[in-house]
Amino acid sequence: MTTQPPQARRCLSWEEYLRWEDECTHYEIINGEVHELPTPTLKHQIVLDELMARLRTFVRKNRLGRLLTAPFDFVIHREPLRTRQPDLFFLSREREAEWKPHQDKPRLEVAPDLVVEILSESDTYSRWKDKLRDYHQLGVREVWAVDIDTEEIEVLVREESGYCSLGWFSGEQLVPTQVLKGLELKPREVFEAARE
């Protein structure tokens, strides 16, 4: 859950975006309009931290690539300008040639292999559908939707026409990721951190 963001909006073209300097770092740009993202709750941050710790340990141990957190922009398209800032994203070592040359930039125009989004009250069905459409257009192979209230994780895998859900996983069920093969992650272990 998150608090509602301020409603201030500004519109940017691609050229303006490249020159844009603002104190706001946590935002998404939808058709040129800047949408400041809501401030996360403490529970959101605890679950995010736990996911980051568990996934990063696995990624580093197996030298799979880089696991990083927001704020960081992924450009869906330039005209009209659309950007997204996933809570967590994974850039694989296999595709290092695509992203590594851009390490000095505050944005990427290539897809991460995996995106993890912690759902919030502001994620209406319509907004979530738009976000998934953007991630699909960008080419994200796998998306996780993390529901703090129900303590479940949905895994969505990319197909030609959209994302296919592998289901919602909870408790002792293993999260069946296709991107991080060999990962043994149980939702219970992630959500327990917020209850301790």
Image: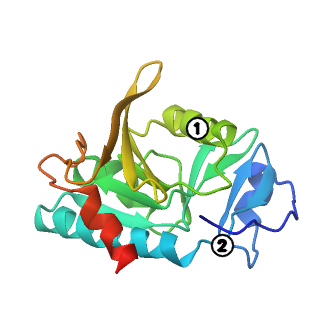
Q: Quadrant of residue 132?
A: top right
Which structural element holds mark 1?
A: helix
Which residue occupies 20% across, 62% down? 59
Query: Left or right: 169 with respect to 89?
Result: left
* Residue 27 position within the rendered picture, expressed as x and y whole percent measured from the top left: 68, 63
Q: How is the image coloured?
A: rainbow
Above or below for 33 versus 68: above
Give residue 19's position: percent from left, percent from top.
75, 66
> In this picture, is 139 found above or below 20?
above
Cα–Cα span, label 2 and label 1: 22 Å
Disc 2 element: loop
Please give the name of the residue rendered at 42% of the width and 19% of the height, measured from the top-left corner.
160
Q: How many marks?
A: 2
Measuring 59% from the left and 57% from the top, which residue is drawn there? 120
Q: Is residue 187 left or right of residue 138?
A: left
Label 1 neighbourhood size at 10 Å, few (<14), some (14-19), many (20+)?
some
- At a point 19% along the width and 53% down the height, the residue shown is 172
Q: Is the residue 107 above or below the residue 112 in the image? A: below
Q: Position of residue 82 (x, y in %)?
A: 68, 45
Please state which amino acid type lies under the numbered disc 2: Thr
Badge number at residue 39: 2
Q: Quadrant of residue 22?
A: bottom right
Judge from the rendering whether residue 51 lies leftward or rightward of residue 32; answer left or right: left
Instruction: Residue under label 1, please give it.
Output: 134
- Compared with 101, 78 (above or below) is above
